Amino acid sequence: MAKDINNCTFVGRATRDPQVFTSRAGKTVCKFSLAINGWKENDVSFFDFVMFDTFAEKVGKYITKGKRLAIVAEAKQNTWTDDETGNNRSRVEFIVKDLNLLDGGKDNAKQTEDMFKVDDSSSRFEDDIAF
């Protein structure tokens, strides 16, 4: 069976500062929304995004309201039953796979570098590899 493709690319501005919190399962979660202008005047779409774990911890602190972002994400549809009405509900949010800060400025390159800096304190490799 052929593999389906679930890959979306967005460029827009953060509508608010992100919400960074720890889930009941102990994972760090970062949620935010992006406003994306359409082709027509006053044609704006709003989309919800979520990041998890170390990615959420590192990147979440650099996203602020109005910041221009380029995002590659995977669409995920969540479904549930509304407790009050008993109706089935659904919502699509996008799981961020990659993010770039697009606003200029002298600190932008440093921020992007810091977001993806790897912690070398726990090396994956033994120091005595012979080659």
Image (cartoon, rainbow, N blue to C red):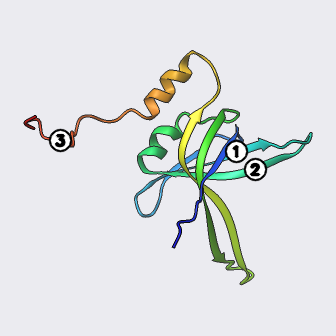
Q: Earlier in the sequence, mark 1 or mark 3?
A: 1
Q: Earlier in the sequence, mark 1 or mark 2?
A: 1
Q: Name the mark nearer the viewer: 3 or 2.
A: 3
CA distance separating discs 3 and 2: 44 Å
**Badge 2: few (under 14), some or many (20 or more) residues near its Cα, within 10 Å?**
few
Q: Amino acid at mark 3?
A: Phe
Instruction: Give above or below for 117 relative to 37.
Output: above
Which residue was labeled with disc 3? 125
Instruction: Give above or below for 17 relative to 95.
Output: above
Residue at image coords 83%, 43%: 38
Choose top left, top right, bottom left or bottom right for residue 55: top left
Numbered mark located on residue 46 in the image: 2
Choose top left, top right, bottom left or bottom right for residue 108: top right
Q: Name the side, left or right, on which 127 lies relative to 76.
A: left
Q: Quarter of the image for the C terminus: give it.
A: top left
Q: Secondary structure at mark 2?
A: strand
Numbered mark located on residue 57 in the image: none
Which residue was labeled with disc 1? 34
Instruction: Give how far across and how far down residue 119 sits, in percent.
Output: 31, 36
Instruction: Give how far across and how far down residue 68 sits, in percent.
Output: 67, 33
Q: Amino acid at mark 2?
A: Phe
Q: Earlier in the sequence, mark 3 or mark 2?
A: 2
Residue at image coords 67%, 63%: 92
Verify CB contact (< 8 Å) between mark 1 and mark 3: no
Q: How many marks?
A: 3
CA distance separating discs 1 and 3: 39 Å
Residue at image coords 66%, 32%: 67
